[in-house]
Image (cartoon, rainbow, N blue to C red):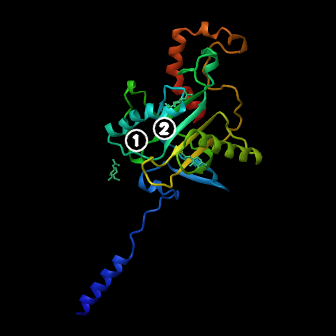
Amino acid sequence: MLAVCLLTFIAALTAAVPTPTPEPPNGIHQCARSECPVYTELEDYGLDMWKRRIEPGVWVRKVAPTCNRTDALGLVYIDIHNYFVDNRINRTTPIMMEVSENKAAPSFCPDQLESFPCCDEIYALLFYIPAVSQATAPPPSKDSGVELVHMEDPREFYGITFGGRPVNHNVTAKYKQLSEYLDDQGIRFDDDAFLVATYDSSRRPQPHRNEILIPIKKPGRSHDRNDGIDYENEGQENQANSAIQRSPITIMKFYLLYPVIMFFQKW
Ligand SMILES: *[C@@H]1O[C@H](CO)[C@@H](O)[C@H](O)[C@H]1NC(C)=O
Ligand SMILES: *[C@@H]1O[C@H](CO)[C@@H](O)[C@H](O)[C@H]1NC(C)=O
Ligand SMILES: *[C@@H]1O[C@H](CO)[C@@H](O)[C@H](O)[C@H]1NC(C)=O
């Protein structure tokens, strides 16, 4: 009898203890649902602004063939999604949209035409490969346009967290808020690229989490290109007749080199 009572008591106790929701080490609850890159929080500036290190890892990336930021995600999402599905790799969060100034454009492109790759900004989608699959993730097929990016060094970013959907004007407003804060503090940052991280699909109930990440200014890096790639037709005097100088070979080279150029400049 006593034993039965005791057992019932224990059973009741066990039932009363709520199963703890696992908290991910970075405190971002979306990262408990789905694996996130490894973050190390470096500073908290308050007002949802912070400095973070993203630890080395493997990513998949695809450049969106468009000059329209709104269209970019829809154009490349499925190819990256398919890479995960086809290779039975679990999806991760967040979706990262890389927005970068198209520095190569002026020498290759006519001024009047804004169509890919002659955009002011280039957009690329990035997804983190889960840790367990990083060593074995197979190279994506060439025609998918998806590439594997081995980020071998940690990268540091300033960031700001915000809710809602990362629509363009909200992204712009948050970028402005963060960059103005950094300017006021005299903190130098890389102003030619940033990332927009989205942690929730639009179908999920609010609150959602989004972030803008601005790369720290790399010490000793000037604004000049120093990626060791010999750009053709550089300089002001060439811009007027750049349209004439854009041979098909040049365009081809541009397409092929682009992912490499972007990676070394931005990441
Ligand atoms: C970008 O695409 C969106 C949706 O497809 C469209 O509504 C918008 O007008 C486009 N913006 C420009 C500048 O073409
Ligand atoms: C993918 O995620 C599921 C559910 O979290 C897990 O059971 C499975 O082991 C994961 N697969 C791989 C290959 O990591
Ligand atoms: C954009 O930001 C405004 C102001 O913070 C907010 O009210 C609005 O809901 C946001 N839009 C979306 C789509 O999240």
Amino acid bearing label 2: Leu
Q: Who comes first in sequence, dot 2 or dot 1?
A: 2
Q: Residue 104: x, y in percent?
A: 61, 21
- SS class of the residue under badge 1? loop
For the point 52% across and 56% down, which residue is it? 26
In this view, 13 is above or below 178: below
Q: Residues within 10 Å of mark 2 (few under 14, many from 20)?
A: many
Element on which disc 2 rests? strand
- Of the 4 image quadrants, the one containing the N terminus is bottom left
Residue for point 64% across, 18% down: 106
Front position in the image: 151 or 37: 37
Residue 88 horizontal/vertical position (percent): 32, 42
Percent x, y for residue 249? 52, 10
Instruction: Report the mark closest to the observer, 2 or 1.
Output: 2
Residue sitting at the far top: 244
Residue to which mark 1 is pinned: 135
Q: Which residue is mark 2?
A: 126
Residue furthest bottom in the image: 1
* Mark 1 closeness class: few <14, some 14–19, many ≥20 residues within 10 Å: few
Residue 72, image x, y percentages: 49, 32
78 horizontally vs 172: left or right: left
Q: Amino acid at mark 1?
A: Ala
Quote the CA–CA distance across marks 2 and 1. Answer: 18 Å
Compared to 90, does 16 lie above or below? below
Residue appearing at x 48%, y 46% in the figure: 94
Q: Is residue 238 above or below residue 125?
A: above
Q: Which mark is residue 195?
A: none
